[in-house]
């Protein structure tokens, strides 16, 4: 369903360099990258599951909560620093909440955008995972 993954960091006097490689750090080939920023205070995003796409979510700046439901179990994950990310498999309902204007949520996905990959109704999602 999900797991926290530490991102390798190379540090020296100039600062830090984080390295993310597809099929190595994240367990899929990265086909799409997007980020959320500048949202109104206490915004919630997501509200869907993907039939095929896997995701890796990182708090690049600030913090937020990722709420997941796999059809049986509901879990919450606090993301608050760019040294680790949250891997999310397909067929998991995702809500990203407690987003504020200063927060930046980076998402890497295993698939290019396709509206057909989305399940946007929670009851429909529950029927498909049972």
Image (cartoon, rainbow, N blue to C red):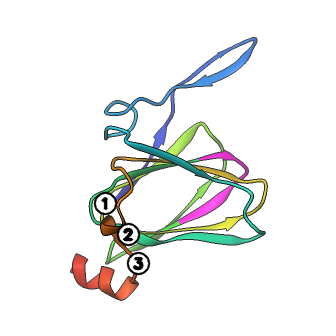
Farthest-out residue, top: 13
Q: Quadrant of residue 5?
A: top left
**78 or 103: which is nearer to us?**
103
Which secondary structure, mark 2? strand
Label 3 sits on a secondary structure element that is loop
Q: Which residue is mark 2?
A: 49
Mark 1 to mark 2: distance in Å? 7 Å
Residues in magenta, as a range: 59-66
Marks 1/2 in contact by CB < 8 Å: the verdict is yes
State whether the magenta stretch is mostly helix, strand or loop: strand
Q: Mark 1 or mark 2: which comes first in sequence?
A: 2
Q: Kindly report the distance in space between the C-alpha atoms of the residues bearing marks 1 and 3.
A: 14 Å
Q: Earlier in the sequence, mark 3 or mark 2?
A: 2
Is residue 64 found inside the magenta-colored segment of the image?
Answer: yes
Q: Which residue is mark 3?
A: 120
Residue at image x 65%, y 60%?
64
- Residue at 36 percent of width and 67 percent of height: 115
The percent coordinates of residue 12 (x first, y second) are: 69, 12
Residue 113 visible somewhere in the drawing = yes
Image quarter where the C terminus lies is: bottom left
Magenta segment includes 126: no
């Amino acid at each position: 369903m999900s797991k926290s993954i530490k991102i390798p960091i190379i540090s020296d006097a100039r600062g830090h360099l984080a390295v993310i490689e597809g099929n190595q750090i994240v367990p899929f080939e990265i086909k799409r990258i997007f980020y959320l920023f500048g949202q109104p205070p206490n915004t919630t995003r997501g509200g869907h599951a993907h039939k095929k796409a896997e995701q890796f979510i990182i708090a690049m700046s600030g913090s937020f909560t990722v709420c997941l439901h796999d059809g049986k179990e509901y879990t919450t994950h606090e993301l608050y620093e760019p040294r680790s990310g949250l891997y999310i498999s397909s067929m998991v309902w995702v809500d990203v909440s407690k987003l504020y204007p200063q927060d930046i949520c980076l998402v890497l996905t295993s698939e290019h955008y396709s509206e057909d990959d989305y399940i946007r109704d929670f009851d429909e999602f529950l029927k498909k995972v049972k």
